[in-house]
Image (cartoon, rainbow, N blue to C red):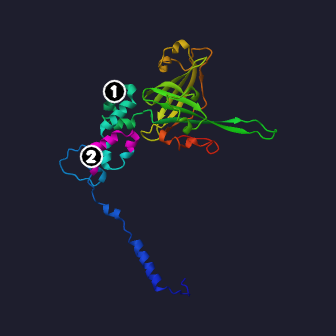
Amino acid sequence: MASDISIPVPSEVSSFSSLRTVEFLGTERPWLNLYGIRVRPVAPFGSVSSKPFSDPALIHRCLPDELLFEVFARMSPYTLGRAACVCRKWRYTIRNPSLWRPLCLKTWQMSGAETNYKIAQSMYGGSWRKMWVQRPRIRSDGLYVSRNTYIRTGVAEWKVTNPVHVVCYYRYLRFYPSGKFIYKVSSQRVKEVAKCMNFRASKADCVFKGDYILAEDHVEAVLLYRGSRHTLLRMLLRLRGTTIGANNRLDLLKLLTTGVNESEISNREDMLAVVEGWQEDETHNPDVPAISHRRGLTPFVFVPFEEVETSVLNLPVDKMDYFVPG
């Protein structure tokens, strides 16, 4: 229904409104000009093309390809993955097998160089980069952390309340490519424990050393608790990742403690050789029975060293009572 009341609009207001409408309708969108235009790809590193090529990027005109390759050769593998997203030339350069071959040989050094070459040829088509991404591997650039919580009944006060406490503790694992690992159980947070998770840790840090082996996606780890009654801790873990190539989760399938004689571990450096062929319920010391633990089996989450200060696992119980890893 039309209104009987008309309000006069000043001419300058009317002209301003029309200009705003024209400006909105005629907004420039320069990216629309790129539709239908074929962009010529950047020549990769080591190209045999005889055609002259002028790279518009300033860093590529100032930095020779040889120096750029040396910069990439000193990057960590995950930094290489990020750098490959910068431009096409970097992506083609980073696919060079000489960047990924030493990383693979170092990561799977326990398999031997000859075995790794055969695996790369037979299973990954000779691509070391594809082998790095798809083959299960233990990461050594951070810590695997398992956050466990349980409820403990408190002391009743004045027969009125019956309090309960949420107790939180962590299991820490750090692996080395040489087949060694270190283990620690503590109530301290990730940013505090990361400083002492190394072979130089003192006895007061309660960091224990052991041996592990990776077979397909399963990890078998063994360490020795020394004391009046020597005890072996045996773990069976399954390696997986939330994305392809992440390898950022370890499912704790079995956690066993068993006794061992001192004669079996004397002059023995490899604890895996000690328990080779043992059954799950086998113990070699009647004072230390074999026990299969059913609690504290929360999966391990990988935390890189550069994220130990900001990891969500540092949150106290009053802010995060339970943590469910993916």
Q: Which-is-in-front pick, marks 2 and 1?
A: 2
Q: Which residue is drawn at 32% across and 31% down?
A: 122
| Residue farthest to the top, as pictured | 263
Q: Quadrant of the N terminus?
A: bottom right
**Can you give x and y, in whole percent of width and height, for residue 164 in the image?**
71, 38
Circle 1 sits on which residue? 113
Residue 177 falls in image quadrant:
top left
Mark 2 and mark 1: Cα distance apart in space: 32 Å
**Can you give x and y, in whole percent of width and height, for residue 318 in the image?**
65, 44
**Could you tell me if residue 299 is visible in this image?**
no
Most common secondary structure along the magenta stretch: helix
Q: Which label number is shown at residue 76?
A: none
**Can you give x and y, in whole percent of width and height, for residue 126 in the image?**
30, 34
Residue 116 on the magenta segment = no
Q: Residue at x 39, y 34 (%)?
A: 135
Q: Which label number is shown at residue 64?
A: 2
**Can you give x and y, in whole percent of width and height, for residue 140 in the image?**
45, 33
Residue 132 falls in image quadrant:
top left
Give the magenta range.
61-81
Could you tell whether 318 is left or right of 304 in the image?
right
| Residue farthest to the right, as pictured | 158
Helix, strand or loop for disc 1: helix
Could you tell whether 101 is left or right of 264 in the image?
left
Q: What residue type is labelled 1?
A: Ala
**Could you tell me if residue 59 is visible in this image?**
yes
Towards the viewer: 165 or 215: 165
Say few, some or many: other residues with alpha carbon within 10 Å of mark 2 (under 14 / 14 to 19 / 20 or more): few
Compared with 301, 19 (above or below) is below
Residue 149 falls in image quadrant:
top right
Helix, strand or loop for disc 2: loop
Q: What residue type is labelled 2?
A: Pro
Could you tell whether 15 is left or right of 46 in the image?
right
